[in-house]
Amino acid sequence: MASLLSLAASQDARALEPREILLVEGAPGGDLYVLERGELTVERDGVSVATISRPDSLVGEMSVLLGSTNSATVRAVGHATVRVIRDARTLLMQDPELSFEVASLLAGRLNATTAVLVDLTKQHTGKVEQGLLRRIFSAVLLPAETETVTRRDLFDPV
C-alpha cells in the first residue's frame, strides 16, 4: 500500500511559516493537504483538538468528503511543509488508490476513537454514561446535517 506522501509526491509543496494558517474554520474547503514535515495544530470552536506531527498525515478531508466548509482552523506550529492536492474531490473520484488510502485512514481514526470511548466507559464502571456512546454512534450513522452532537460531561450524575 502506498503512502499518502508518495501518492501526493507530484503535487505542489507549500511551505508554512510559524503560526501561519493553512485552513480557516468555516471557510470553503476542497483541497487536501499531506504533512511532509513540521507540526500543525488543529482548533475547532477555539478549542485545541489535535497536534499533527507525523509526516504522511492528512488534513482537509472532512470538508472534501462532506462537501462542506472547513470544520477547523489548522496552523503551523513552526516551519512546516505540506503537499497540496487541489480539487481533491475530483481526484478522489478518479484515483482508487488515493481514495482507498483516505478511507483506510478514516477507518483507523474511527477505530481509535471507538477504542478510547470503550476504555473510558470501562474506567468508569458503575457510573452513568449519559448516552454519549449512543449519540456518537448515531451521529456516525446519520448524515452530517441530520443531527448535531453536543458533549456534556461524559459521566455527569443523573
Image (tube, grey):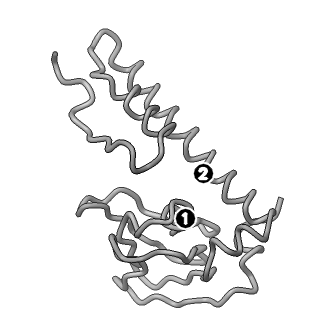
Query: Could you say which is closer to the camera, residue 52 or residue 63?
Result: 63
Q: Quadrant of residue 21?
A: bottom left
Q: Is residue 140 above or below residue 24?
A: above
Q: Is residue 86 above or below residue 103?
A: below
Q: Secondary structure at mark 2?
A: helix
Q: CA distance from mark 2 to mark 1?
A: 9 Å
Query: Could you say which is closer to the camera, residue 106 or residue 78?
Result: 106
Residue holding disc 2: 106
Residue holding disc 1: 61
As drawn, which residue projects farthest toward the top? 126
Query: Could you say which is closer to the camera, residue 45 or residue 5?
Result: 45
Q: Is residue 68 above or below residue 156?
A: below
Which quadrant, please, contains the N terminus? bottom right
As drawn, which residue projects farthest toward the front? 146
Residue 143 location in percent, x, y?
47, 46
**Disc 2 or 1, which lies upstream in sequence?**
1
Q: Amino acid at mark 2?
A: Leu
As drawn, which residue projects farthest toward the left? 157
Q: Is residue 131 above or below residue 101?
A: above
Asked if disc 2 and disc 1 are in contact, CB closer than 8 Å, the reply is: yes
Q: Is residue 86 left or right of residue 95?
A: left
Residue 90 location in percent, x, y?
68, 74
The residue under the point 41% across, 78% down is 76
Q: Is residue 109 left or right of residue 149?
A: right
The residue under the point 57% across, 81% down is 82
The residue under the point 50% across, 65% down is 67
